Amino acid sequence: MKMNRPRGRKVEPVPRIPRIASVAARIKSVLRSLADPEKARGGKSYFKEPVLLYGVSSAESRGLALEIYGQVKAFWGWREATALADRLLPDPHLEVKAVAIILLGRFVKEAPASLFGKAKSWLLAEYCNNWASVDTLCPEVLSPLMARFPALLGQVESWTSARNRWLVRASAVSLILLARRGKELERAYAVARRLFCSEDDLIQKATGWLLREAGKTDMKRLEAFLLAHGPKIPRTTLRYAIERFEPSARRRLLAGTR
């Protein structure tokens, strides 16, 4: 028997759940369409290690991630976003990694603590094998998880002795958002002390960055810390750490920490 559709009633189509493979392909396709070889060549000058770039700006990459989020948020959760990151992060292009991480970051508020271990595995696998990718992963994924699950903070402190340079850099950068808000300062200073022995300039810069942010809520404490540990602090770290001091104070700290 044929059923008649009720008159005057619009039948809405069943929404189609975005497939992970299709979303991954779209992200790569859009980034390729935005590629600017001249910008890519210029962008490589900011890295000592070899990187592959499309030449897409950070603003464009973030805009793409947020656009995709708007399309999938009604259907996806943290699991799907993590699966997408698993698919995209092995791609050598920096912008592909960035879009995957930023998109995942929109779902972190609902993710369990176990996502932290997944993010660590990406660092160990060197899917985030440059400072820019690490510095995207930390505030988008690691820092929010640490804020929600304080037990994870101890793991980060242990990364300071890792052999993987990206895991070591993450031990500092992942604390920056918390330190900037005046939280976990004891741990931030403890991590900085443990990193003073590093000869890696990317670690030295990250350590100085962490100290600078820790000092925003208590400059006197930062000054006392720097003077107390002066000769042990790499000069690169020190210069980053004192950027927010007045010129006269910077000169005093540079002289007093030799």
Image (spheres, rainbow, N blue to C red):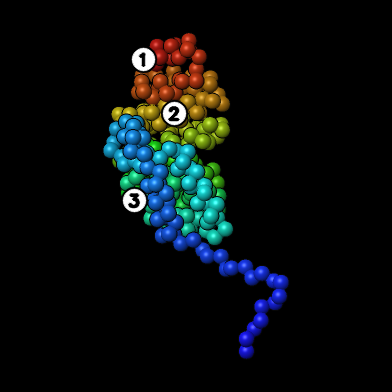
**How far across and down, in percent of the image, does residue 121 sit?**
37, 50
- Residue drawn at (50%, 17%) of the image: 245
* Real-space CA distance between mark 1 and mark 2, rounded to the nearest whole angstrom: 20 Å
Residue kind at label 3, given as amino acid type:
Pro
- Residue at image mark 3: 90
Which quadrant of the rendered structure holds the C terminus?
Answer: top left
Between disc 1 and disc 2, the foreground one is 2
Q: Is there any visible trace of residue 166 in the rendered image?
A: no
- Tell which circle, 3 or 1, labels the residue nearer the N-terminal end: 3
- Residue drawn at (40%, 31%) of the image: 206
Label 3 crowd bin: few (<14), some (14–19), many (20+), radius 10 Å: some
* Real-space CA distance between mark 3 and mark 2, rounded to the nearest whole angstrom: 28 Å
- Tell which circle, 3 or 2, labels the residue nearer the N-terminal end: 3
Between disc 3 and disc 2, the foreground one is 3
- Tell which circle, 1 or 2, labels the residue nearer the N-terminal end: 2
- Residue at image mark 1: 258
Give SS at disc 3.
loop
